[in-house]
Each structure stands twice: as C-alpha cells, then as structure tokens.
Amino acid sequence: MDVHEYQAKELLAGFGVAVPKGAVAFSPDQAVYAATELGGSFWAVKAQIHAGARGKAGGIKLCRTYNEVRDAAKELLGKRLVTIQTGPEGKPVQRVYVETADPFERELYLGYVLDRKAERVRVIASQRGGMDIEEIAASEPEALIQVVVEPAVGLQQFQAREIAFQLGLNIKQVSAAVKTIMNAYRAFRDCDGTMLEINPLVVTKDDRVLALDAKMSFDDNAMFRRRNIADMHDPSQGDPREAQAAEHNLNYIGLEGEIGCIVNGAGLAMATMDMIKHAGGEPANFLDVGGGASPERVATAFRLVLSDRNVKAILVNIFAGINRCDWIAEGVVKAAREVQIEVPLIVRLAGTNVEAGQKILSESGLDLITADTLTEAARKAVQACSDAKRAH
C-alpha cells in the first residue's frame, strides 16, 4: 500500500524526522489559505499522486505570491499527471501539498528497502540527491552507500554515523543526519514499511537536515494492525477494478492482454496465465476468486473481467478442493444470465463434484466451450480469441 507525500511526512514527523512546514489543500482557495497560514514568501505547490518524478512532469510549482499559489493549484487540481512512473494513462490529482520552500545548500538521497533476497532491511544513501536511484546505480554505482541491517539489533548509531560521514557532511550536520537516519529507520520498521525514499534529503545553510520529499510503501498484510495507515489509502490512485475486487475479497490485477482469467487459487492463476502465454495468447488479468467462491462472487468476477474492453474471451479454470465444481458452475450460469457475456466463454472444471458441475453447465443452455485439461482450455481460449478478433 502506498501513501501520498504529505501523509508520509506526517508519519516521519511523528518519529522525529524534520520536515518543512506544509498543509494539504483540495481547492485553489484552500491552497492560498494554507500559504497564508504557513507564512513566508516562497512556497512549493506539489501535486499529490502515488508516483515519483513529479517535478520533471510539471507537478511541482514554485510560487512567490498568493496569486501564483492559486494559479498553480488551479492548474494541477483535476489534472491527470503523467510521469515516467505512472504510464501513459497518468494519475488523477485530487489534492495538492503547499509547503514552505526554504533555500538549501545540498541535496542528498536516503532510502530504506526490504531486501527480500537478503531477508534484511537495506539502507541506501548517496550524495547525488534529486536523481532517480536507478540513474545513480547505472551511471555511478560507486556513489551508492549501502548498509544491511541485522534484524536482531536493528540499525545502530555507528552505522548511521558512517553513512553521514560518507555523505560528506560536517560535524554539526552529521549530528542532525544521524538523528534523521535513525528516526526514519524507526518509522520504516514500526510502520511495517517495505520502502521509504527521501529524495532529496536537503541540508540548509544553518546546518539543518530536512526531508524535502518522501515516499512510503507498506506491507498490505500488516495493515490490520496499522489502522492509522490503512485509513490513508487513496482508492483514486489505483485501478478502480482492483478497488472493486478488494471490496468483494477478490484478488485482481489488470494486465494488457485479451483473454480474461477467472481462477481459484493464486498458484493455479499463475499457471493458467503461463499456459495462455504458452499457447500463443496474452492474459488480460490475474483474478483469484479464492477457495470459498460463492455464485455471487463468481458473478462479480465476471463483471470485473468484462469491464476491461480489451477482453475478447474468458477462461474459467477451477480445480475444486475446498471449493466445489457444482457451486462454481452455478456461479458461471448465474453470471452468464445476469451479465451480458458477448465474448467466448471457456470453462474447465476439475476436482470435487466435477460431474455435477459439468452437468449443470451442459443443461444450462448457455453457449459454452468446455475443456478437460488446462492445456486444452488455454488452446481453446486462444483460438476463440483469434476467431472473435477476425469476426470483428
């Protein structure tokens, strides 16, 4: 789960990380009011989306007057901001963050990531702040400072000091940087983070160290114990189909293919997608209806898949263990009657009550394509998809 910049800064500030003063606004007038409350004479108006590289895409405006603040907010709000991380469809800007833009002397990079291969938290820092970490790694890999944290003891003060000195800071700045590095680690650890990126981490003329930007991602599986963070979720920043699927306890991820998949079990769903690729097709989605899929949930799954206009065929692949084939068959029949399915529907059932399920399908009067094996089902789905495309 991702959060907006202003939310990440709110969390970091709660752990003692210094951040510039700022306020969120949902309208141009609110943005102006925020600027007046913050004081000063120089502000940054930042589009709030779940993606980086906003500055390069025009998502950050520097303003010296209240009129400029209003114009910047008016330009950004309601816009779909396209950055190198959003894809061509972009993400909607529904709020902006107005922040005091105090001058600074240096830009640094500080990041924390859950390294799954090492099974450790990895701290990454660099003197090349303000750049994408991928660019730094590609152009100057020696510029990256990396520390792997031992989970039994956590990040230690001496490790934070080593990072601070390698960043080329003076004694006074090192003290502030160590505090920032340690507190940011505590925020990452105690909030069940999977990624925290402060880019840039800036050093001011009076030797303060501030998190000028912040991105945080969290482990979805831990959100039941982090309700304050779960409440920060912004559904508008994700695929609306994925949000709808989550409401019905369905696992859905939209892809770019033409064969919709409705499968029970994540492993079987992956195998189904692989088999479609092997047969020469492209899956349109990953969709796991779970082990206890009711007819209502199956009908919901059909609606989700059909909401993708690229779908030319649907493959239902069920291996029933906990679930029952007759139950799934009832769901398929109900969905086909409730939802106007105008694309070829291929159904493969195996496992518990498979004969009863196949009988329900055969007596339904629906125009279905059945298969006994996954290989056969994938081949028929690809063929049906090709026939549908030729027909159009």
Image (spheres, rainbow, N blue to C red):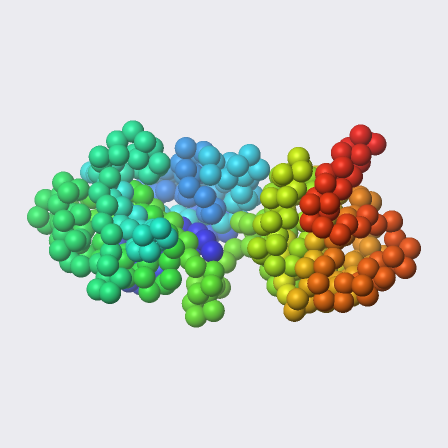
**Residue 155, located in which quarter of the rendered image?**
bottom left
Residue located 76% across and 42% down the image = 380
Residue located 76% across and 37% down the image = 383
Whole-percent x, y for residue 19 in the image: 29, 53
Viewer-nearest residue: 388 or 369? 369
Viewer-nearest residue: 203 or 100? 203
Residue located 82% across and 55% down the image = 336
Q: Does residue 244 sit above or below 377 in this rendering?
A: below
From the viewer's perspective, tell me whether residue 346 is left or right of residue 366: left
Screen quadrant of the C terminus: top right
> In this view of the protein, can residue 308 be seen by the observer?
no
**Residue 301, located in which quarter of the rendered image?**
bottom right
From the viewer's perspective, tell me whether residue 162 is left or right of residue 146: left
**Residue 290, located in which quarter of the rendered image?**
bottom right
Viewer-nearest residue: 320 or 176? 320
Whole-percent x, y for residue 203 in the image: 20, 44
Whole-percent x, y for residue 189 in the image: 32, 61
From the viewer's perspective, tell me whether residue 208 is left or right of residue 296: left
What residue occupies the far left of the structure in this picture? 171
Q: Does residue 125 sit above or below 11 in this rendering?
A: above
